[in-house]
Amino acid sequence: MFGLLIPNQPVRTDFVQISDTSMQALIQNVNELTNLTVFNIAAPMPPADFAFSVYLQQSHFDPIFLGQLTPTLHSLSLAISHHIKQRDIDSNGLLIISIEQLMPMQPDQFTDNEKLSMVGKQLAEDMFQFCCSFEDVYFQGQHYIPYQAVEMWMNSVHQRVKMNQKFWNKIQ
């Protein structure tokens, strides 16, 4: 059995078997998806040299390979917003898991500069969302965000960097 975790939704285990080696779960409004986690919940491992390959398919587009679950890697947590092809069209998608030949580890697909650019964009989006959460706070007729709140947000980013100076390596 497998689990699928999508932000702001309960854990899903509603995968449907479509063949002896494949299963899938329907994802509604896949165009709104930013990240997901797929994990193995006591599923029997495939034979040696095989693994559970995980794919995301949006609408009629070809499936996109996200990674493999192996005997030593029981979950995948991925930022997938860059894989979504059509953000402006509500569409359903599929998360597909199939037993396939174990693939060798692939080198990072992005350079450090591309990763830093993606981190910068995500931090800017996170800061924007944070600021939007204060849209009903006014001070003398002006939009107001307490400095202490912004400082708290900056400290949380600083803590992430202190804990792992290359945390952007996890961006897929």
Image (cartoon, rainbow, N blue to C red):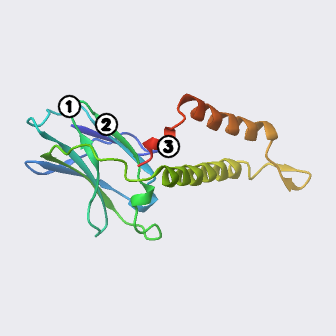
- Quarter of the image for residue 68 reads top left
Q: Nearer the viewer, residue 23 or 13?
A: 23
Mark 3 = which residue?
168
Mark 2 = which residue?
75
Mark 1 = which residue?
71
Distance between the alpha carbons at the discs numbered 1 and 3:
25 Å
67 to 26, vertically: above or below: above
Distance between the alpha carbons at the discs numbered 2 and 1:
10 Å
Q: Residue at x 20, y 31 (%)?
A: 71
Residue 74 x %, y %: 27, 33
Q: Nearer the viewer, residue 166 or 29?
A: 166
**Is residue 5 visible in this depiction of the protein?**
no
User: Is label 1 in a helix, a strand or a loop?
Assistant: loop
Q: Earlier in the sequence, mark 1 or mark 3?
A: 1
Q: Nearer the viewer, residue 70 or 58?
A: 70
Type of amino acid under label 1: Pro
Distance between the alpha carbons at the discs numbered 2 and 3:
18 Å
